[in-house]
Amino acid sequence: MTKKNIIAKFFLFQSFTLIAFLSFSQNKNSNEKFEITVDKGVNIVPYMKMPVQSLPQPSSATGNRGIVTSFLISKGVQGIQSLIENRKKKYTANYSFAIKDESFYDNISTLGPFDPTGINFKGFKVARVLKNSDGSTDTAFIAKFVIDTSQDKIKELMNNSVFTLKLDSFILKSARVKMPHSSKKLNFDFEINFLASFIGDNGQINSDVCLGKFIYTVRDAPVDANEIGYKEFYENLPKNKPNCTGQAFLVPRSAGYFKNSETGTIEKCYGTGLYSIKAAVKESSKNNFADKLIVYTSSDIITLGNAGLVKKYGSAPAAPPKPQSKP
């Protein structure tokens, strides 16, 4: 056998090994699947719910600057969460969900890339579904998150182009991890990322830009439906702990054009906002947690914000030179 044939067979073996590994890792359990679906509605933030605000006076430019910078700073540090560790692998499981190229708005706009009218994103739900031997299916767990449309959050959505999520419902029926004999409860961490692809006014293409991240934790969730307090736990969870940690920018609309039906002319517009959701879930049956600081990568956001402020208000005047001391 020539050296060339030996090398060719080696790479062929490596290729089959890699394919087998990927097939095994992606189909750990062929009897389960992970589903994510977006819940859409019509004009989630209707005109009548938009709060009326008075315009600031021309002399209050400093106040406007404070509003912007305070938001940028709040994006920097979002607080401390107790996240599940992977020290005992058999008692933890990780799985993920993803959906791509959804439209955040139900209409185009001529106002700008962050025009909030026509938002059709109500929320989304993730589910782990089990397939039985007879072909029927059971839902092991399902979690639904919705956009927060309370009055204060609508104002923040309009003024700063950001939105927040809250838990709408959560139900657990089956564990994916090994359960200790002493425990019938599970713990969950949800990490939700929003990404967008869009074209700016300058023609630059932006692909899968991270708009923000959300964290939601569930602790001591009962698995046994016959356990006392099972029903009450899931009914009260959205009331006792509704809010996700974090926030995200509104999905930017791409710069484009449309043909005006009245004038017949081609005019500039902004699109319906393409976005993707990536949700990672960590499940654990052991109460071994580690406090970790969740810090959003805000350096780019702050740099962008400062650049915008300088463009709008100008840079700070240079400090006068210090007088030099005489010898």
Image (tube, rainbow, N blue to C red):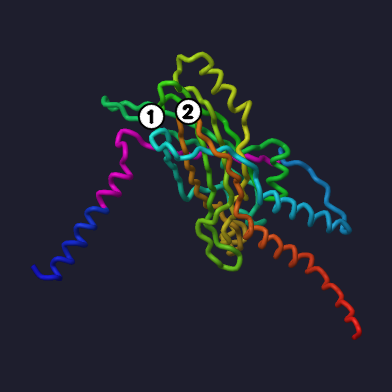
For residue 186, which numbered disc appears in the image? Answer: 2
> Which segment is the magenta one?
19-47
Left or right of residue 67: residue 216: left
Which residue is painted at 50% across and 56% down in the image? Answer: 208
Q: Quadrant of the N terminus?
A: bottom left
Q: Nearer the viewer, residue 227 or 211?
A: 227
Where residue 6 appears, x then y in whole percent? 14, 65
Q: Secondary structure at mark 1?
A: loop
Where residue 312 appears, x then y in whole percent? 76, 65
User: Reading the chain from its start, which is encountered first: label 1 or label 2?
Assistant: 1
Left or right of residue 327: residue 66: left
Against 43, is 111 above or below? below
**Structural crowding at the residue carrying mark 2, measured as other residues with C-alpha within 10 Å and reported as few (<14), some (14–19) or many (≥20):** many
Determine which residue is flagged by label 1.
Answer: 178
For residue 313, which numbered disc appears in the image? Answer: none
Which residue is painted at 48% across and 24% down in the image? Answer: 185
Type of amino acid under label 2: Leu
Q: Nearer the viewer, residue 286 or 239?
A: 286
